[in-house]
Amino acid sequence: MRDPSHWHRCSANQFYVDPFHWHQKMRTIFTTGQVAKICKVAPRTVNKWFDSGRLRGYRIPGSQDRRIPREHLIRFLKEHGMPLGELESETQGESNDD
């Protein structure tokens, strides 16, 4: 039986999703290009954040493409005092655990 979360650790701060469960219970996922636009930085900067473990996410199995789950992006933005921008309206209904 598979892990019910379908997330598998591939390094200390990075995960990948079992491709057979890609469609199940997935939250919004962002590419590094999308994250770069939200953060108003170059895509290479997002790659560096990811590779250093500051921004959590996973690689697509069989490729070098990175993906950032919405909850990890929001956490990263809050931890680094960055504006949520277009994500702010989406987080209005969430509780604040701070």
Image (tube, rainbow, N blue to C red):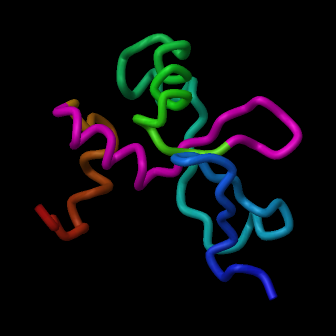
Residue drawn at x 27%, y 34% is 85
- Left or right: where 97 falls relative to 42: left
Q: Is residue 72 above or below residue 4?
A: above
Q: Count numbered badges in the picture.
A: 0
Find the residue positioned furthest to the bottom: 1
Find the residue positioned furthest to the front: 12
Q: Quadrant of the N terminus?
A: bottom right
Q: Is residue 50 above or below residue 17?
A: above
Q: Within the image, what quadrant is residue 17 found in?
A: bottom right
Residue 38: percent from the left, percent from the top?
Answer: 39, 28
Q: Within the image, what quadrant is residue 32 found in?
A: top right
Residue drawn at x 36%, y 24% is 39
- Left or right: where 42 falls relative to 32: left
Residue drawn at x 54%, y 43% is 68
Q: Quadrant of the C terminus?
A: bottom left
Q: Is residue 87 above or below residue 64?
A: below
- Left or right: where 50 falls relative to 93: right
Residue drawn at x 70%, y 73% is 24
- Left or right: where 18 falls relative to 12: right
Q: Nearer the viewer, residue 97 or 53?
A: 53
Q: Which span is picked out in magenta?
A: 59-81
Residue 79: percent from the left, percent from the top?
Answer: 22, 41
Residue 31: percent from the left, percent from the top?
Answer: 60, 34
